[in-house]
Image: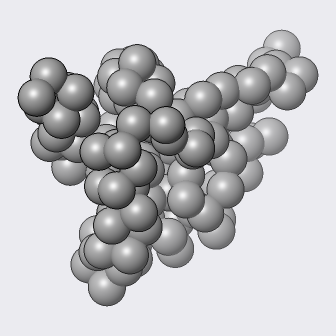
Amino acid sequence: MRQIVKVLKVLSDQNRIRILKLLDRRKFCVCELAAILGITQPSVSRHLKKLKAAGFIGDEQHGFWTDYFLNELDDRYGKTLMRLIRTWLNDDPLVRQDKDRAGKVNRSILCCRK
């Protein structure tokens, strides 16, 4: 019971669902996700922390950037829900807008480091 409640709580936020839909396409860094979603980097980081704690995502360092990606879940509830999320909402206007924005983000411009 505890595990399914934990998973459902993590998935009960629109921005976290949007992040999962984006990460189903490819890896992204925080600044790219913030630009696509139209929310602050600290907000994105909080969402990523919750998704990572629940096992939905992982991260890896690439130079200056930390890339986030979908994990293969061991948890049967998370695995089932993630399979469904991958097929749901593909025609949702917000998800489609995110997909369009994702094709236009450029981390070299967004995440300039001096």
Give whichever of 7, 63 is nearer the camera.
Answer: 7
The colour scheme used to paint the residues is one colour
Report if residue 93 is visible in the image: no
Residue at left 37%, top 26%?
54
* Quadrant in the rendering for residue 78: top left
Q: In which quarter of the image is the N terminus?
A: top left
Look at 65% across and 27% down and name the residue there.
Answer: 59
Q: In this view, does 19 lie above or below 67?
A: below
Q: Residue furthest right?
A: 63
> How many numbered marks are there?
0
Q: Which is more toward the observer, 5 or 97?
A: 5
Instruction: Give how far across and how far down residue 52 sits, in percent.
Output: 46, 24
Quadrant of residue 65 in the image?
Answer: top right
Q: Nearer the viewer, residue 6 or 70?
A: 6
Residue 30: horizontal and vertical position, in percent? Answer: 56, 31
Q: Residue at x 58, y 44 (%)?
A: 72
Relative to residue 5, is residue 111 drawn left or right? Answer: right
Percent across and percent down for residue 48 are 43, 27
Q: Which residue is drawn at 89% across and 22% down?
A: 63
**Image position of 77 (left or right of 44):** left
Quadrant of the rendering where the C terminus is positioned: top right
Question: Residue 71's spot in the image, x, y percent?
Answer: 58, 40
Farthest-out residue, top: 114
Residue 78 seen by the camera: yes
The part of the image, by quadrant, that contains residue 88 is bottom left
